[in-house]
Image: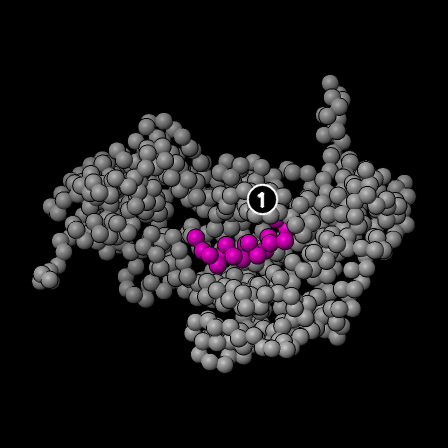
Amino acid sequence: MSRIYKLSTLVANQIAAGEVVERPASVVKELIENSLDAGAAQVDLEIENGGFKLIRIRDNGCGIHADDLILALSRHATSKINNADDLIEIKTLGFRGEALASISSVARLTLSSAIANQTGWQVVTEGIEEQPVCCPAPHPRGTTIEVRDLFFNTPARKKFLRTERTEFEQIDTLLKRIALSCFSVGFTLKHNQKLVRQYRAADSPLEHQQRIGSLCGDAFVQQALKIETDTTLDLTLTGWIGLPTFSRAQADLQYFYVNGRMVRAKLVNHAVRQAYHDVVYGDRHPAFVLFLTLPPSQVDVNVHPAKHEVRFRESRLVHDFIYRSLQSALAEVRPGQPQLLPPTGIQSRTSLQVDPPPIQQSFGATTWRAAPRKVQEHISIYQRMHEDGLSLTPSVDIDKKNTATIPPLGYALAQLRTIYILAENAEGLVLVDMHAAHERVLYEQLKRDLANTTIVAQPLLVPLSVALSDREVDLLEEQSAIFLSMGMRIERISQTVILIREVPSLLRHVEWEQCIRDIAADLIEQEQSCRLQDYADHLLGTMACHAAVRAQRKLSIAEMNALLRTMETTENSGQCNHGRPTWMTLSIQELDKLFLRGR
């Protein structure tokens, strides 16, 4: 081997650029984040040839002092932190001081800036090691950065870029994500001298709604819940989540921000997926725009070169907080709740105070609490429903003339093909899929019964041994007390072997060797597992499906009204436990339109 020597500044910066500057959109991200850190209220972006030829960003932020312009292009030069202690509480989007140095090493860069009440100055670099020269240049308060001929001196990197259209779409999507998190900042985007996007600064709730609509579509606005959830632990979750019926084939409308920083986090995706797991149909994906706020000391943003990922100090607490917040919001979606009024924009809901339980008391989403009754006593009741038909407490049909207010789902009129219930409410016609609706009612009842029932454990005649890695066995052993509370007893018999001695009798037919491996994989990936709960929910869902009143069964008016009243007080009653809708309404205005009345 040759002797060790120090790399030149240019090569070192180009290596750093390989981590930060992947494509034109990467340049845009770093520069706009600098503009936002500078307090800009307006950011204007101009692109030519998808960013290959030109990226120009202008802002009206605080600007850069003339004496600091050349220093700003140096590696590890920043005004955002001073010492290692500052890394514990990072409150800015940028902090490493690498962006400008990296970009200037692979492009021709011009930096112009001015602070308040001073003339502007400019510095130009050409991707070489020569010391740049600073000279006066007229410029209003703020900063303009021009990046030309990206990767002109690193052709190997340029070969990996896509077409002009693809690269511009990446920039367009990036600006959309940034605009979603900075309502008070205005943005414009030009491509090849043509104005493509203009997002005006939004200050009022109505303007926030308008920006959400322009970025995510009016359909999302009309079918979204606005949530404002906080705890006594300095955790706050705000934003919008789509109704289960607004699910999508792809995970293409999912935006999550931590302290204003757009991030990707497996923990967050798992919490959201778990909250929607029995209200979204099949493999559909929920839509959301969520903002998590927590003390900067509780989150590490310095885990990815491009700052795409974060690590939470109390990851399980954050997971459970997000899960419970979304689950509570979705559970309130039922007939008669404000969220289901005719769509007139995003409906606000009252701020929900959530206090997650101590970490050691939770496993996955919920804890199955002990109570004096046994679940078997209730299971048989629901299983008999398949033979006995609808088993709801019947109610007497109410005389509508003597009723001050009409219930949200109205009053039953008839059955259509003995499949659908037709009812009349204050708005018009209500149609209910009676099997899907009854299935959700029974499913929620079964879940409540199970939550208040002692889990019965069944000893295995021959204990099952499962060989795993040291790390997996360690994690499983740490959770042994929680397993026991759920009717599953495990025992470590060696460094790499777990012995399963007892399993929940409700889930005795589960393939336990594969189950324990899946749980161990979950614990490594996201520090928790919901496998047992998922198995139980699947079983309860199957039981509810078989016990629910079947299509082709004729119901009396009293039975139909009983089902409607029960739906109005049942969580998640807008969907069956397979995620299909249970009811819909046609207003008088919609019916008039169908029949061309008033024309």
Q: Residue furthest left?
A: 3
Q: Pick the quarter of the image with the C terminus.
A: top right
Q: Residue furthest front?
A: 462
The picture places residue 485, in percent across and down from the top left corner, at 62, 74
User: In the figure, 508 relative to 238: above or below?
Assistant: below
Q: Is residue 574 magenta?
A: no
In the picture, measured across the screen, residue 357 lies left or right of residue 141, that is right
Q: Is residue 273 magenta?
A: yes
For badge 1, the amino acid type reads Ser
Secondary structure under badge 1? loop
In the picture, measured across the screen, residue 45 lies left or right of residue 352, that is left
User: In the figure, 39 relative to 48: above or below?
Assistant: below
Task: Name the quadrant containing residue 242.
Answer: top right
User: In the figure, 343 relative to 101: above or below?
Assistant: above
Residue at 22% in and 52% down: 15
Residue 364 in view of the camera: no
Residue 589 in view of the camera: yes
Q: Which residues are magenta?
A: 264-280
The picture places residue 284, in percent across and down from the top left corner, at 57, 46
Viewer-nearest residue: 343 or 7: 7
Residue at 73% in and 38% down: 585
Q: Residue furthest bottom?
A: 493
Q: Pick the quarter of the image with the N terminus.
A: bottom left
* Residue behind mark 1: 247
